[in-house]
Image: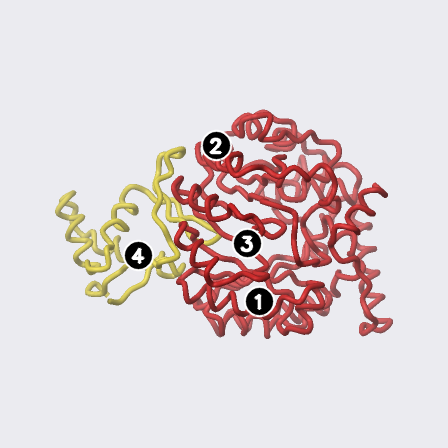
Chain colours: A red, B yellow
């Protein structure tokens, strides 16, 4: 198969002032594996190699990418290469001057997260007072003429605010709002019992999304990322393993998705040791599940294998214990009862008093070190 | 419609994709792969030419008749995705 990458997610740092309990960064982000961040020159080389491989879309993410003082230089290099660059930021302490400088450097698009529709809930979920910074940055972004995406991760504690969140994005003049139901990896999996919503919550939110789509038409694109635990079939994760997408982590490891580093049975190469082309074409992590020759039953003989590519390798590893199995979300997987049990726990918690305070672990360096030490 | 002036939405950018030997239209979180004619139409959409002007320019280059319908359909498709704006 002639797979060439289109997307590169550059995780510039795992430092972040926010502490969202569903963070997609590794639980062990504070550990030695991620410590030695790539230099400006190394990132620029990665961008050049990525572009030569076929990458056109670049996400500048983290952690909090604006903590990198060389962000402007990285953006300028990406722009000169012809990459379409998106800044994916919390907007914590992000000034108009910084955004203007990034615009000048050639940044194409800004995505700013918000954790809830009002300051009280947003700041509680983020674990850091940040809502007012976000609102200010949304306005700067529009004033400077950037296309704007409002990003929200949805879960049990904020799904009831979907209408308010869409109206917030509408009032800001955003192009898109991404309503991303929590996917359970990393911190989100650790905090799953506090985050997993009920069927009723999801159905209500989905009705609102449909109403608002009908009302707004093309004025605001409303992206709804499916809550896969409540689906019958798995998501077509990353459009298939190592087909179009790669993540480069702060210290230079390259992963087929931003959660894949957790799979201990794969060997990940580093841009410090290998050219990106070799990593994409030859490395263990990228070749192991490319195509469909690796597939076991029930995927192998399933007509849906060209639709969902067997689902998510990370989920197979984390839930079923083997990255080479069918995604346990699939109703045909023998491991589906493990997903059903998690959903049943969420439903039970809701029926026994949904207003009980939610216990979760905030994403922070001390917690990361403790969890990493536990394995 | 043929008198209206089409232009690319500022969020979209035409880009040559040398690796795949084609032009693409890039926008937030997505892209549209273009064939040679599509790319040429968009390059002609400079904010001053009307749809009729764009079609006339193509007709002049290739001598093809009845091209205006195709141009309109192509641009309407991109406008539905919010990537092309009409108006002056």
Chain letter of disc 2 in the image: A
Q: Earlier in the sequence, mark 2 or mark 3?
A: 2
| C-alpha span from label 4 to label 1 | 39 Å
Quadrant of the rendering where the C terminus of chain B is positioned: bottom left
Residue wearing tag 3: A88
Chain letter of disc 3 in the image: A
Residue A53 x/y as whole percent: 47, 32
Q: Report helix, strand or loop for mark 3.
A: strand
Q: Is residue A292 above or below residue A225?
A: above
Q: Residue at x 74, y 53 (%)?
A: A364
Residue wearing tag 4: B75
Q: Does the image show residue A151?
A: no
Badge 4: few (under 14), some or many (20 or more) residues near its Cα, within 10 Å? many
Seen from the viewer's position, the closer of residues B60 and B86 is B86
Residue wearing tag 2: A49
Tag in front: 4 or 2: 2
Badge 3: few (under 14), some or many (20 or more) residues near its Cα, within 10 Å? many
Tag in front: 4 or 1: 1
Tag in front: 2 or 1: 1
Q: Residue at x 36, y 56 (%)?
A: B78
Seen from the viewer's position, the closer of residues B87 and A294 is B87
Q: Does the image show residue B70?
A: yes
Q: Which mark is residue A133?
A: 1
| C-alpha span from label 2 to label 3 | 22 Å
Q: Which mark is residue A250?
A: none
Q: Residue at x 59, y 29 (%)?
A: A272
Residue A367 x/y as whole percent: 79, 51
Q: Residue at x 85, y 66 (%)?
A: A348
| C-alpha span from label 3 to label 4 | 30 Å
Q: Report helix, strand or loop for mark 4.
A: helix
């Amino acid at each position: 198969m002639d797979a060439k990458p289109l997307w590169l997610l550059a995780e510039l740092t795992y430092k972040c002032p926010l502490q969202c309990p569903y963070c997609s960064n590794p639980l062990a982000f504070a550990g030695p594996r991620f410590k030695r961040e790539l230099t400006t020159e190394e990132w620029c080389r990665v961008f050049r190699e990525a572009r030569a491989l076929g990458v056109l879309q670049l996400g500048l993410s983290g952690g909090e990418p604006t903590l990198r003082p060389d962000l402007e230089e990285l953006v300028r290099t990406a722009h000169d290469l012809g990459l379409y660059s998106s800044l994916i930021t919390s907007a914590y302490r992000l000034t108009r001057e910084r955004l203007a400088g990034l615009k000048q450097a050639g940044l194409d698009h800004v995505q700013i997260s918000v954790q809830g529709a009002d300051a009280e809930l947003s700041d509680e979920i983020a674990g850091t007072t940040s809502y007012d910074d976000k609102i200010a940055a949304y306005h700067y972004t529009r004033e400077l003429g950037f296309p704007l995406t409002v990003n929200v991760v949805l879960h049990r504690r904020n799904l009831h605010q979907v209408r308010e969140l869409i109206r917030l994005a509408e009032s800001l003049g955003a192009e898109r709002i991404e309503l991303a139901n929590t996917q359970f990896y990393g911190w989100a999996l650790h905090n799953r019992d506090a985050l997993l919503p009920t069927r009723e919550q999801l159905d209500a939110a989905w009705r609102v999304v449909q109403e608002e789509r009908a009302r707004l038409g093309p004025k605001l694109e409303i992206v709804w990322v499916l809550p896969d635990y409540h689906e019958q079939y798995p998501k077509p994760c990353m459009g298939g393993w190592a087909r179009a997408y790669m993540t480069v982590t702060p210290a230079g490891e390259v992963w087929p998705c931003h959660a894949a580093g957790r799979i201990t049975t794969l060997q990940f190469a580093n841009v410090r040791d290998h050219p990106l082309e070799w990593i994409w074409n030859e490395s263990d992590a990228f070749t192991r599940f490319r195509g469909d020759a690796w597939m076991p039953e029930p995927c192998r003989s399933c007509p849906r294998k060209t639709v969902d590519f067997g689902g998510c390798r990370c989920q197979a590893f984390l839930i079923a214990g083997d990255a080479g199995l069918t995604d346990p979300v699939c109703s045909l997987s023998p491991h589906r009862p493990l997903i059903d049990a998690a959903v049943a726990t969420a439903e039970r918690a809701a029926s026994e008093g949904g207003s009980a305070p939610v216990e979760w672990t905030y994403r922070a360096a001390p917690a990361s070190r403790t969890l990493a030490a536990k394995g | 419609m043929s008198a209206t002036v089409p232009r690319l939405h500022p969020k979209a950018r035409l880009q040559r994709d040398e690796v795949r030997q084609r032009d693409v239209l890039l926008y937030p979180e997505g892209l549209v792969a273009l064939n040679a004619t599509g790319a040429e139409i968009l390059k002609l959409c400079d904010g001053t030419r009307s749809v009729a002007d764009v079609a006339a320019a193509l007709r002049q280059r290739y001598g093809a008749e009845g091209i205006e319908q195709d141009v309109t359909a192509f641009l309407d498709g991109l406008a539905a995705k919010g990537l092309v704006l009409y108006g002056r």
